[in-house]
Image (tube, rainbow, N blue to C red):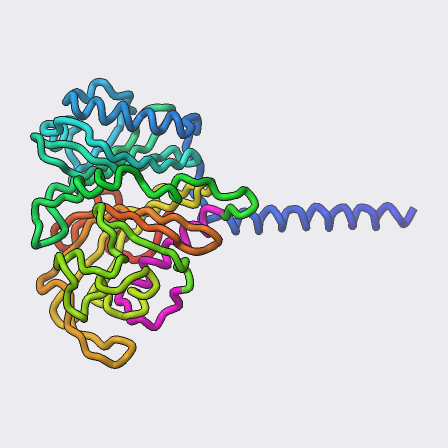
Amino acid sequence: MKKKPMAAAAAGLLLFGAAVALSNRGAASANEPRPAASNNCDRECLNGLVDQYLDALVAHDPSRLPLTKTAKFTEDGQRLELGDGFWRTATARGTYQFYMDDPVVGQVVYFGTMREAGSPVSLVLRLKIEDKKIAEIETIVVRTGMNPARPNDTGAESFEKLGAPDRLFLEAIPPAERVSREELSRTANKYFSGMQMNDGKGDYSFFADDCSRIENGQLATGGRNTMAGGSGPDNSYAVLAGCRTQFQSGLLHFVTRIRDRRFVVLDTEHGVALAFTFFDHAAGDTRTFQTPDGKTVTAGPTNPWTWEIAEAFKVEKGKIRRIQAIFHRCPYGMSSGWSSWADAMSDRARW
C-alpha cells in the first residue's frame, strides 16, 4: 500500500523533469526565428518567385506579381510605391545570378546583374513569402562604383566575368556537420564584430585558412588594393592576402560601426548566412590609430561615410571559408527602412 505514494511521487518527478527539459529546450531556441506563418514555399518556389519578380521588373509591370495586401517595397533604403524607381528604368536581366534560400522563414535573397537604360548595374533582391505571395521586397541597386578611380564600375561587369558564384556556396554541408541557425549566424557575425574598430588583437580563428572575399565582383583578399587600382600604400589592409591576415593587421580600425545587422537567410543545409547591414566610417579623429606592431597610421575616408551592404558567408565546421558582398555608398547614418531607430543604430546582430 505504501508503494503507491512513492510511485506517484516518482511519476511526478518524471513529469517535472520533462517539463524542465521542455522549458530549457524552449529557452535554448528562444533566438531561433519562428517559421513563416504558412511555410509552403520550398527552394524551387522561392527561386521561381525571384524569376517572376525580375521578369515583371523588366516588363515594368508589377501587376504580374502575386502580392499580399500589405506588401512593402524599398529601394536603397527608401520606401516606394511598387512600380517606381528601378521599376521604371530596368531594361534587361544580366548573366550573373546567385540565389540564397531560407525555406524555414520563407525568405530568399538574390545577387544578380541587370541593365538600366543599357548600362550594367548590380542588384540585391530580398523577398519574403507568405502563402506563396510576396509580402516584403527589399532591393539595393548599385549604380555607382566603390572605386573612386572607376566611378562607373558598378561591379556588374566584374560579376559577369566571374560567371557564377563560388561553387562552395552551392555545396551542401554533410548532415552530421550541420549546425543550428543560431550557431551559423553567430559564426558569421564574428566577421562584423572583428572588423568594427578593428585593432588586430582579437581571436580571428573563425576564418578558415583558405578564406577569400569577393566585393562587388572583385577579389578583396588577393593582396592588391582594388580601391586604389594598384599595389596601394603600405597602410592599406587591401594589399594583404587572406581574410585572417587583413584582420590581424589592425588596419580596418577606421570602420567605426557595423550596425543594423539583419541575418535574413540562414541556410543550414548549405552553411550560408546572409546579412543586410551598414558600415559607418565616422572619419575625423577615428582615422588615426595604432596597429599591433605599435605603428601609428592614418587611414580611411576623410569625411563621414556609410556603405549599405548585403553580405553572404559560407561557413563550414565553425569557420568562414567564403564571403561575397554587394554594396554602395549611401548617406551617412542611413537606415534600411526595415528596422526601428534603435535597431538601425545598434551593432547587435538579429535573426
Residue at x-position 23% and y-position 68%: 251
Residue at x-position 14% and y-position 59%: 230
The front one of 324 and 61 is 324
Residue at x-position 39% and y-position 54%: 320
Which x, y percent locates residue 193?
33, 61
Compared with residue 111, is residue 93 higher up or lower down, i.e. above or below?
Answer: above
The front one of 212 and 111 is 212
Residue at x-position 25% and y-position 33%: 137
How many numbered discs, if any? 0
Please state if 130 lies on the left or on the right of 53 as rendered.
Answer: right
Residue projecting furthest to the bottom: 294
**Is residue 77 visible in the rendered structure shown here?**
no
Which x, y percent locates residue 24?
57, 51
Q: Is residue 186 magenta?
A: yes
Residue projecting furthest to the right: 1
**Rendered image quadrant of residue 232:** bottom left
Please state if 59 lies on the left or on the right of 50 as rendered.
Answer: left
Which x, y percent locates residue 154?
14, 43
Residue projecting furthest to the top: 64
**Magenta region, mostly helix, strand or loop?**
helix
Compared with residue 20, is residue 241 higher up or lower down, i.e. above or below?
Answer: below
Q: Is residue 268 magenta?
A: no
The front one of 166 and 311 is 166
The front one of 3 and 134 is 134
**Is residue 250 visible in the rendered structure shown here?**
yes
Compared with residue 74, is residue 24 higher up or lower down, i.e. above or below?
Answer: below
Which x, y percent locates residue 185?
40, 50
Please state if 34 lies on the left or on the right of 324 as rendered.
Answer: right
The magenta segment: 180-204
